[in-house]
Amino acid sequence: MKNRCIMIFPKFNNIEIINGIRKQYDPLFEKVDPHITLVFPFESCISSQELQKHINHKLSNTKPFELTLQNIIKVSTDTGHYLFLEIVKGKEKLKVIHNNLYNSILEIYKPLWLSDVDFKPHITLGCFKSKEELESAYEMVKNIKNKFSTIVNKISVENIDKDDNSIIEMEINLTNS
């Protein structure tokens, strides 16, 4: 069984701002680079070839696209308290990709909680045990208004090891054809 996740690792010219916030507030900072999750972690026996075929098929009409993130927001759910960097351009494209990937062989791995909420793609900047910790961190970063822009041209599949380290299993390039 492999524990995997499908995501985008965006490349920004000013990524050091994101990394500075994550280093302070994200417990996974040392384990995984800044990312946008498309398919949440799932354990399966799906072979690499089968998964790659599925992703290639689902992304066959997906061309590289512009992505812009801006605005730090706070989110509290039953699972925790978070700082998210919002997507302001490319959000609808990410939602389509997310929905397409969860069709077919990955459908049974879609978390139940995703059925009850609207998928909001983002980059996690921080994770907190309490609402008070979240509020305190938000006060420190709320005035950061930088824009983070890039072109998304590939989707990555990561393996998550027993220590929560991210190991890239494959990358699927988006093509203009």
Image (spheres, helix red, strand yellow):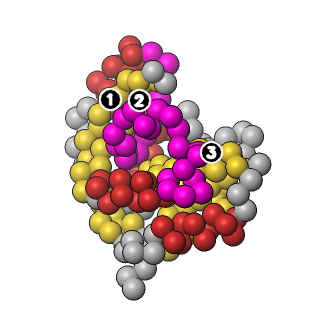
Residue at position x 32%, y 60% from top? 93
Horizontal and vertical percent position of residue 39? 51, 50
Of the numbered discs in the image, which one, if any, rests on residue 74?
1
Tell me how far mark 2 sits from mark 3, CA to CA.
Answer: 21 Å
- In the rendered image of this protein, does residue 101 appear above or below residue 78? below
Whichever of labels 1 and 3 marks the residue nearer the N terminus, that label is: 3
Q: Quadrant of residue 133?
A: top left
Mark 3 residue crowding within 10 angstroms, few (<14) / some (14–19) / many (20+): some
Residues at marks 1 and 3 touching, judged by CB atoms closer than 8 Å: no
Provide the residue designation for mark 2.
Answer: 82
Q: Nearer the viewer, residue 93 or 54?
A: 54
Residue at position x 39%, y 75% from top? 61
Three-letter code for the amino acid on which mark 1 is drawn: Lys
Horizontal and vertical percent position of residue 131? 39, 16
Q: Which residues are magenta?
A: 102-130
Lateral position of residue 8 relative to residue 143, left or right: right
- In the rendered image of this protein, does residue 82 appear above or below residue 175? above
Lateral position of residue 56 relative to residue 138, left or right: right
Whichever of labels 2 and 1 marks the residue nearer the N terminus, that label is: 1
Whichever of labels 2 and 3 marks the residue nearer the N terminus, that label is: 3
Residues at marks 2 and 1 touching, judged by CB atoms closer than 8 Å: yes
Tell me how far mark 1 sits from mark 3, CA to CA.
Answer: 25 Å
Res. 176 in view: yes
Q: Nearer the viewer, residue 128 or 154?
A: 154
Q: Nearer the viewer, mark 1 or mark 3?
A: 3
Q: Quadrant of residue 74?
A: top left
Provide the residue designation for mark 3.
Answer: 42
Residues at marks 2 and 3 touching, judged by CB atoms closer than 8 Å: no
Three-letter code for the amino acid on which mark 2 is drawn: Tyr
